[in-house]
């Protein structure tokens, strides 16, 4: 990535726009609104592209591989231990149901690859748990026969069929559904074309399958964290 401050993903990686439609990373343009893990918009800017040796991250089950540049920041859940580590930056947990057992951390792909296998086993990729189905069908032309009830308790058996959407998240998702073990991370033997950008606010956005992704370098990310913490302190002042 350029100056370590952008999202750099292998071309062909599919993301979610704010309106719920899919877009390839190389097709994102200045000003596009992508979908954040809280259901809000994230504006893309600083569009870049290039070619490099990329890391392929393999996750548990049938999850799609994530292919990124070495300095791309991964936002992951990490199991708690009694030890203190400084290789990654701990941020405020965004998944409140998981906070008792996990930290939410930011670490570059290269730094993650340098960890030993036992340490890497503590880390999990995760999907957004805050999106309700209505957040994902914004502005969609849905089939008139599709319906759902906000009071339904059997979301796993209900689907909203809309164009460009073939699956919906379960309202009753648990941590087991949200966290995905990382089985391996490998530096590919051939260079691959990548594309990237930055997004505003918390620098988080979603892949097409709701996997939470991060875009900026540590310096830029820390500036945002310090700013929001300062704002919270100001709100507490009389």
Image (cartoon, rainbow, N blue to C red):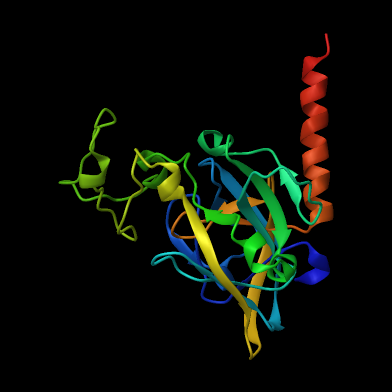
Nearer to me, 114 or 152: 114
Q: Is residue 114 visible?
A: yes
**Quarter in which the C terminus is drawn:** top right
Name the outermost residue toward the bottom: 190
Could you tell me residue 122's position as x and y percent?
61, 55
Q: Is residue 132 left or right of residue 125?
A: left
Nearer to me, 6 or 17: 6
**Quarter in which the N terminus is drawn:** bottom right
Name the outermost residue toward the left: 145
Q: Is residue 122 left or right of residue 132?
A: right
Q: Quadrant of residue 208?
A: bottom left
Q: Quadrant of residue 96?
A: top right
From this view, report whether residue 114 is shown above or below residue 100: below
Q: Is residue 207 left or right of residue 21?
A: right
Could you tell me residue 54's position as x and y percent?
65, 79
Residue at 25% x, 45% y is 156
Nearer to me, 47 or 202: 202
Residue at 21% x, 50% y is 143
Q: Is residue 56 visible?
A: no
Q: Quadrant of residue 235?
A: top right
Could you tell me residue 101's position as x and y percent?
57, 39
**Tally of marks:** 0
Q: Is residue 20 left or right of residue 31?
A: left
From this view, report whether residue 156 is shown above or below residue 17: above
Could you tell me residue 144's position as x and y percent?
18, 46
Residue at 36% x, 46% y is 137
């Amino acid at each position: 990535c350029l100056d370590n401050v952008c999202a750099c993903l292998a071309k062909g990686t599919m993301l979610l726009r704010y309106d719920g439609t899919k877009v390839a990373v190389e097709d994102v343009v200045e000003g596009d609104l992508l979908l954040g893990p809280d259901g809000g918009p994230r504006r893309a800017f600083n569009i870049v592209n290039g070619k490099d040796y990329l890391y392929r991250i393999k996750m548990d089950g049938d999850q799609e591989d994530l292919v990124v540049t070495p300095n791309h920041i991964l936002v992951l859940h990490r199991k708690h231990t009694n030890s203190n580590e400084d290789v990654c930056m701990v941020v405020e947990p965004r998944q409140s149901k998981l906070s008792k057992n996990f930290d939410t951390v930011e670490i570059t792909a290269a730094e993650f690859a340098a960890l030993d296998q036992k340490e890497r086993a503590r880390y999990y990729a995760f999907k957004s748990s805050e999106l309700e189905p209505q957040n994902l069908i914004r502005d969609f032309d849905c089939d008139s026969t599709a319906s759902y009830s906000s009071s339904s308790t059997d979301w796993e058996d209900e689907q909203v069929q809309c164009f460009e959407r073939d699956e919906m998240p379960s309202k009753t998702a648990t941590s087991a559904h949200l966290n995905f073990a990382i089985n391996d991370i490998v530096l590919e033997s051939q260079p691959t074309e990548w594309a990237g950008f930055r997004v505003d606010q918390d620098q988080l956005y979603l892949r097409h399958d709701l996997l939470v992704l991060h875009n900026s370098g540590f310096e830029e990310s820390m500036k945002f964290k310090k700013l929001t913490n300062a704002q919270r302190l100001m709100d507490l002042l009389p």
